[in-house]
Amino acid sequence: MKIIEAGDYQEMSRLAADYISGKVRSSEKINIGLATGGTPIGTYTKLIEDHQKNQTSYTNASTFNLDEYVGLSGDHPNSYRHYMNEKLFNHLDIKKSNTHIPRGDARDMLQECLDYEKKIAECGGIDLQILGIGSNGHIGFNEPGTSFNSNTHLVRLAPSTREANARYFESLEKVPTKAITMGISTIMKSKEILLLISGERKREAFARLMENEETENFPASILRNHPQVTIVADKAALGNNSWFL
Ligand code: F6R
C-alpha cells in the first residue's frame, strides 16, 4: 500500500482529485467506483473545479457507486443517487446513463444485487475504486463480520454507522436500517483502489489498517492483500502514526 500524506482535508481532496482526473485524462475509457459520505465531498468539488478550469472530460467515464440505502428512491434527498447528482454528476459532462448506483427502491432487492454485480462485470470491471473507511473499518456498507467473499448484497447497518450518518437526516430514527452494497469481493476485484482517510475520528481505524492482522472483524484489513492501493490521509488521521510513512 502506498501512503500519501496530506497536510489537511483540503490538500487531501486536491491530491485525490488530481489523481482521479489524471487517470480520466490518460484513459480511453474508464470505470470509476465512487463512494459517498463526508470524506469525498472535497474531492468531488475539486474534480468539478478541474472540469471547469481544465476541461477534463468525463464522456469516456462510467461510474459505479458502492452503496445505497434500502427504501429510499433516487429522488429522496438522503439517497446516495441524489447526493451524487448534486455533488458531482450534475456538474460534469458525464452521461447520466453511464452513472450506476444500486436502486434502493427496487421491487426485488435480491435481484437488484445480482443485476448490479453483473452490470459491473459486463462493463469490464472497475478500474479505479474510491473508498472511504468507517471508524469500525467498514468499506462500502460492509460491516465487521462480512465475508471477504461477498458480492453485492443486502446489509443491516451497524448502530454505529446509523449514528455516524444521522447527521444527514432529521433524526436517528429516519436513518434506514438496511442498505445494498458492493461486497468485499466486488471491491477487491477493482484494478486499483484509492482510499481517502481524514480527521482525528479516523485515526484509530487508520492505525488498525496498518496493523498486520487480516480479519473479517475489520473489513478494510483485506485491502492489505490488494496489489494496487493508494491511501491519501491527512495529518489529523495520521496522528502519531506518521512513522508508518
Ligand atoms: C459510502 C461508504 C462508506 C463511507 C464511510 C465513511 O458510500 O461506502 O463506507 O465511506 O462510512 O464515511 P465518512 O466519509 O462520512 O466518514
Image: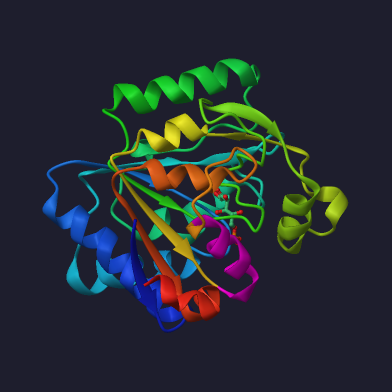
Q: Which residue occupies the foreground of this view, 140 or 24?
A: 140
Q: Position of residue 162 (x, y in %)?
A: 76, 51
Quadrant of the rendered structure where residue 67 is? top right
Q: Would residue 81 be visible to someone looking at this image?
A: no
Question: Could you tell me how many numbered marks the image carries?
Answer: 0
Judged from this view, the residue extending furthest toward the front is 212
Render colour scheme: rainbow
Q: Which residue appears at 66% of the width and 41% of the height?
A: 144
Q: What quarter of the picture does the N terminus occupy?
A: bottom left
Please give the name of the residue rendered at 38% of the width and 24% of the height, measured from the top-left corner.
119
Q: Is residue 56 above or below residue 114?
A: below
Q: Is residue 191 above or below residue 171?
A: above
- Residue 152 in view in this figure: yes
In the image, taking residue 189 as reference, residue 105 lies left or right, namely right
Is 95 in front, or is 223?
223
Q: Which residue is located at x 52 percent, y 43 percent?
A: 214
User: Which of the pair 79/41 is nearer the observer?
Assistant: 41
Q: Position of residue 134 (x, y in %)?
A: 61, 55
Q: Which residues are magenta?
A: 199-209
Ligand 1 positioned in quadrant? bottom right
Q: Position of residue 110 (x, y in %)?
A: 62, 17
Q: Is residue 239 above or below residue 192?
A: below
Q: Is residue 6 highlighted in magenta? A: no
Location of residue 91 (image quadrant): bottom left
Task: Based on the picture, tell me whether residue 207 belongs to the magenta stretch.
Answer: yes
Looking at the picture, does residue 202 appear above or below residue 154?
A: below
| Residue shown at the point (38%, 79%) measured from the top left | 11
Query: How far from the left and from the top, in percent, is residue 127?
Result: 27, 41
Quadrant, the C terminus: bottom left
